Structures are given as structure tokens and as C-alpha cells.
Amino acid sequence: MKKFIQEFKEFINKGNVLGLAVGVIIGGAFSTITTSLTNDVIMPIVSIFLGGVDFSTMSIQLPSIFPVAVDAEPNMLNYGNFISAVINFFILAFVVFCIVKAVNSAMDKAKHKEAEAPAAPPAPPEPSAEEKLLTEIRDLLKEKK
């Protein structure tokens, strides 16, 4: 059990969880924006081309199998809300696709620049055993003069 708790602490401290939490919060806020864009901007424009149809009012009354009270609200299938949600999903997916594409492009450019950067000149090769011996002989001869 201690190992499990230790692994959990390491997982939390890595920062991945914090990044994920921030992503979820920003995603929720972004979802609110795209929902508003869909419902308040796009759907009214689409309804112009469909003769002023309001998707939020599109529904079908479902039949009742069992007897219901006279003043009970009818059971409705609100497919207009579903259409709005599907359009909202596609807008959100498109925006996320564009963001991922931009990030991948930036990362590819950074990798390309790293590959183009000139490498440090290679270190001179290690002298061979003969060269080392000749160097020692030269140094000894210089000392005797």
C-alpha cells in the first residue's frame, strides 16, 4: 500500500496532472464559447437559409403508452437541440484540429532548425601509439640540448 501511495505522489508531482486539470478547465470555458457561437451566431444564420427555422424549437411529440394525467406535459423528442450539439461538436473539433496542426507545425520547424544548426567541429583524433612515442623521443632530445 505504501508503494501505491508513493507512486501516486510521484504522479501528482510530475506536473502532468496539473497540466491536465488546466486543460480541462480551459476546455470547459472554451466549450461555453463554442456553444454560444453555435446557438447565438451560427444557428440564426443557418435558419435564414432554412426559412427562419429555429432549431431549438424542433421537436416531435412522442406517444404515451400508458394513460397520463390531462394536465401532464407531453413527452417530447427535442432533435433540434441535438442538431445544435452536433454543429457545436464539429466547430470545437475543427478548432482543436487547427490548434494541434499549428503546434505540430511549430514543433517540426523547431526540429528542422535544430537539424540545420551547425554541429560543433569534431575533436581531433587521438594520436596513434607511434605518434605518442615519437613525441616523447622529440621531447627527450630537446631536453638533452
Image (cartoon, rainbow, N blue to C red):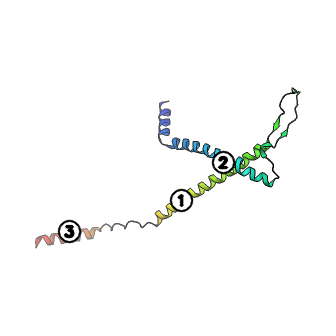
Numbered disc 1: secondary structure: helix
Q: Is residue 4 left or right of residue 83?
A: left
Numbered disc 2: secondary structure: helix
Amino acid type of the residue that numbered disc 2 sits on in the rendered structure: Thr
Disc 1 packing (10 Å; few <14; some 14–19; many ≥20): few
Corner quadrant of residue 68: top right
As displayed, is residue 19 above or below residue 111?
above
Q: Nearer the viewer, mark 2 or mark 1?
A: 2
Q: Residue at x 86, y 36 (%)?
A: 62
Contact flag, marks 2 and 1 (Cβ < 8 Å)? no
Q: Residue at x 34, y 66 (%)?
A: 123
Q: Earlier in the sequence, mark 3 or mark 1?
A: 1
Q: Nearer the viewer, residue 47 or 97?
A: 47
Rendered location of residue 117, percent (x, y): 44, 66
Q: Which mark is residue 136?
A: 3
Q: Which mark is residue 106?
A: 1
Numbered disc 3: secondary structure: helix
As displayed, is residue 140 above or below residue 22?
below
| Residue highlighted by disc 2 | 34
Quadrant showing the C terminus? bottom left
Q: Nearer the viewer, residue 129 or 17?
A: 17
